[in-house]
Image (cartoon, coloured by chain):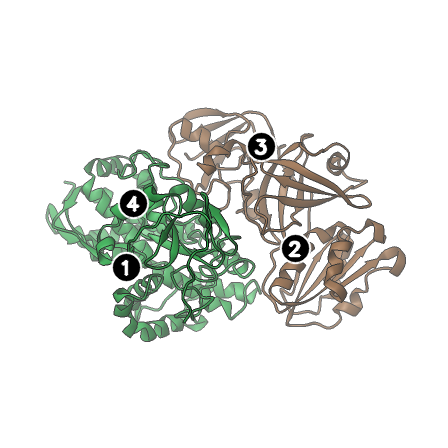
Amino acid sequence: MTTTPMPTATTSVPTVDVDPFSHEVLADPLPMQADLREAGPVVWLPRYGVYAVARYAEVRAALVDWQRFPSSAGVGLSNFRYEEPWRPPSLLLEADPPHHDAPRAVLAPILSPRALRRLRERWFADADDLVAGLLDGAGDVVELDAVDALAEAFPLRVFPDAVGLPPEGREHLLPYGDHAFNAFGPANDLVAKGAPRVAELSEWVAAQCARDALSDDGFGAAIWAASDRGDITPAQAPLIVRSLLTAGVDTTVHGLGACLAALATHPAAWDRLRARPDLARVAFDEAVRWESPVQTFFRTADVDVPIGGTLVPEGHKILMFLGAANRDPRRWERPDVFDLTRDPSGHVGFGMGIHQCVGQHVARLEAEALLGALARRVERLEPAGEPERHHNNTLRAWESLPLRLHLRS
Amino acid sequence: MGADDHEHDADRLVVIGKEIAADGVVTLVLARPDGGRLPDWAPGAHIDVTLANGATRQYSLCGDRWDAHTYRVGVLREVAGRGGSAYVHDELAVGDVVAFGGPRNNFALVPSTRYLFVAGGIGITPIVPMVHQADLVGADWSLLYGGRSRSSMAFVDDLARHGDRVHVHPQDEQGLLPLAAWLSEAREDTVVYCCGPAPLLAAVEDATAHWPPHRLRTERFTAAELGAPVRDEPFEVELARTGTTITVPPRTSVLAAAREAGATALSSCEQGTCGTCETTVLAGVPDHRDSILADHERAAGDCMFPCVSRSCTDRLVLDL
């Protein structure tokens, strides 16, 4: 074991004694985020021996600066310079140029809006079908848990098919992703909770990444085809498929959950969306800004990096609070308001720069399909009980979101 | 914020350095007017540069991508050219501003344990960052670099630090490149990268005809066949969803102008890399400045990224 050395910065850095991964903070991170933003452009978190940025400008600057804040030492708390990763590192998320180049160059066009056009009609029909299954013959008012009935059901219905997974075992996807995102945080009870199933889930995921396990017309097959062309190596292909399975399910589920929760509690926004269904993508991005389903990522300073008068020393971890940046009043007017008249462009909920979410167009298409299907059938939606948070070290999520849907007559 | 501050300068570069790199070759060092970060790139990438005389030329990036604030390009004076290179050599000066698009990469370095680089003349420019990268990943590599004469060959001094991996082969001293000797053995573990004049590319294609597929990667600059010239004057954009027509002045993005007119247009990176603002083009010819579309997608002209791309025609009609 190696202990993290104390900072050697010559200037004082504000210290905030908080545990961002405690259940108290995970239940409501907003007060802590405000404290961190106010404390300074960069702060020191003694609890974990890391620096942190929570203001929009500094978070964005750190995200895009792959030269000075690389990712290959891990984008969680664990520093791969000293600690063994819990699984082989991601070729995308936990890699820097030049190794990052080829996997990203291969995956980006496979998930581009132009490539997704062929899925559009089918996903819209799937969304209509899912919503019809919930609403047809159920009367004028339907109560449901939006987490499992909508936010989980729709991605699980369309995304594994698009990747090309076989039908069996898909129930492993959410727990695997949940653990992967917990593992970016400290080794707390949330990580311990997932530990007993890690081997089993990892083995199942690895098996799905093999060429033979995948259909011949999905994202997975397209990744393997790139290895046939020599654009990536055959050893890289399964790990790039793995990235889709790790990062492409839970994130979208919680993004949709955030969006449905926001719309249920902002009736004017729902009315506006019903009047203008072309706002569905804006509604989703505004929800991603407002809720930031991915709350945090870490980087590691490759050299001493000055931030606002403080030197972040080489080799030290820096924690970027995406959620805090997305509600920074220095960047956003009335940041705490979910507002469909706002232009949420430029939020960092998908990250920014060379590691920006490569699947963001997939997520937006899923949201557009599901929100459109609901808007065509539902006059009004409202909370039907106390929602319950799902705690994860990285994700802001709902465990349960009871909604009451009033159907159009 | 950062992205918004220099939005009106997002397609501008200022020349901050100009040096003679060899007989008939100058290198330019380019930066944002505000000194900000430039869009990311990888070896093999090029930018489109629109010069003040209206000419647009593609130049491979040959600098250091770990410096996020400058680009370097090498420019050969083409005696039979259409005036772009003569302008760069004779007129363009430090402090001058050019418009740019990209970077784009049709010549990306794929992973391999072994590389053979073949460069002819100014074709060395994309190869310079490639050999640096091959070194970084610990690959086994060699470079065969030909030119008319030693004095006409750029970057020879820089490349000398790689020792006997680099084979400099001036034609007036040693004749044509010994391609047969270098390429006779077809190797499954080797990727060949070739950039240079068309006869060299043809010779390397012939010499590797017996190699396994996808082992040869070439970069071929063809003069852009633009249907209409790139313009530096206002153009009209019709926003089809509302029927509004707006005028987009120079140095204002189509995206900004459309938003000003009330259009809802989601974006993210605002530098033509993330793809969020992809917009359907209903009429007119877009002037593509993004890093995303492949050549055939550009030619189709049915979509564009209004955060950076503009118009070749007087009028564009967009699905906004």
For residue A392, the mark is 1
Instruction: Report if the CB atoms under discs 3 and 1 are less than 8 Å apart.
Output: no
Q: Earlier in the sequence, mark 2 or mark 3?
A: 2
In this rendering, the label closer to the viewer, 2 or 3: 2
Instruction: Report if the CB atoms under discs 2 and 4 are less than 8 Å apart.
Output: no
The reply to whether label 3 and label 4 mark residues of one chain is no
Label 4 marks a residue whose chain is: A
Label 3 marks a residue whose chain is: B
Q: Residues within 10 Å of mark 1 (few under 14, many from 20)?
A: many
The chain that appears brown in the image is B
Report the Cα–Cα distance between label 2 and label 4. Answer: 44 Å
Report the Cα–Cα distance between label 2 and label 3. Answer: 32 Å
The residue that label 2 is drawn on is: B129
The residue that label 3 is drawn on is: B312
For residue A35, the mark is 4
B54 and A51: which is toward the camera: A51
In this rendering, the label closer to the viewer, 2 or 4: 4
Residue type beneath disc 4: Asp
Q: Residue at x 34, y 53 (%)?
A: A294
